[in-house]
Image (cartoon, grey):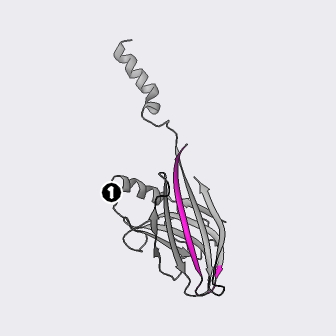
Amino acid sequence: MTLFEKVKKYLRQNWAALSGQMQPRAATRVRVEMRVFRAAEGRWVDLPSVENVL
Amino acid sequence: MTATVVTATGITLIVDRIDNTSTATSAWIGWGTGGSSTGGTATNADTGLKAAATEAWVAATLSQPDTDSNRFVATITAGTAKTVEEAIVFFGTSTATGTATNRCLVRASHGGQTLATGDSIQYTITMTATSV
C-alpha cells in the first residue's frame, strides 16, 4: 500500500471525527421566570419558574 | 403540562443571525390561552402560540446577563379576565407570524394563571447555551 493509499484509508475511516461530527453537542437551557401583578391587591406575586434543557 | 423549549424555528434564527442572513433585532413576548389544550404542551416544532390572547405583544428588553446567555423581559397586562397558559419569544419586524423574517425563538407552556382585568405578568426568559 502506497503512502497516498494509506492517507486515503485513514481519512475514510476517520473523516467523521476529523470533520467535527464527533464533537460534543451544545445544550440550550431556557428558564422562564414569572411574577404576576394583582391589580386588586396592588402587589406582585412570584410564580414558579419553568425550565428545560434540550 | 409545563414545558419550555427553544424551537426548531428558533435554531434557524440563531444560525441566520450569526451570518447576518437575518438582521431581525426586535424581540417580542406574547401570551396565549392554549397551553393545556390538546397539543398545547410546548415542543420544538412550535412556530407560535397555540391560542393567542387578544392583548398585543410587547417589545422585550434584551440583555446579556452572562457571556453565554440572552435574557428577554416584558410585562403584558390583561385587558379582560382570562387564564394565561403559554408565552413565546418572537423575533421579527412585526408581530406577524409564520414568515421567513418573523420567527418564534422560545415557547413555554407554563401552567394556567388566572388573571383579572388589569392584572399583569412580567416574563423574564433566559436562554443559556452550554457546551457539554
Percent position (x, y) of residue B19? 34, 52
Q: How many marks?
A: 1
Q: Quadrant of residue B22?
A: bottom left
Foreground of the two, B34 or B27 = B27
Q: Residue at x 34, y 17 (%)?
A: A4
Side of B101 relative to A36 (left or right): left
Magenta-highlighted stretch: main secondary structure? strand
Q: Chain of mark 1?
A: B
Query: Magenta residues, as a range?
Result: B114-131
Secondary structure at badge 1 equals loop
Residue B39 visible in image: no
- Residue B92 shows in this picture: yes
User: Label 1: few (<14), some or many (≥20) within 10 Å?
Assistant: few
Nearer-the-camera pick, B120 or A43: A43
Position above or below: B79 against B3 = below
| Disc 1 target residue | B21
Residue plotted at (60% across, 83% down): B119
Spot occupied by residue B118 in the image (x, y as percentages of width and height): 58, 86
- Say above or below: B117 vs A3: below
Q: Choose between B130 and B100: the one closer to the eye.
A: B130
How far across and down, in percent of the image, does residue A1 sit? 39, 11
| B45 to the left or right of B103 | right
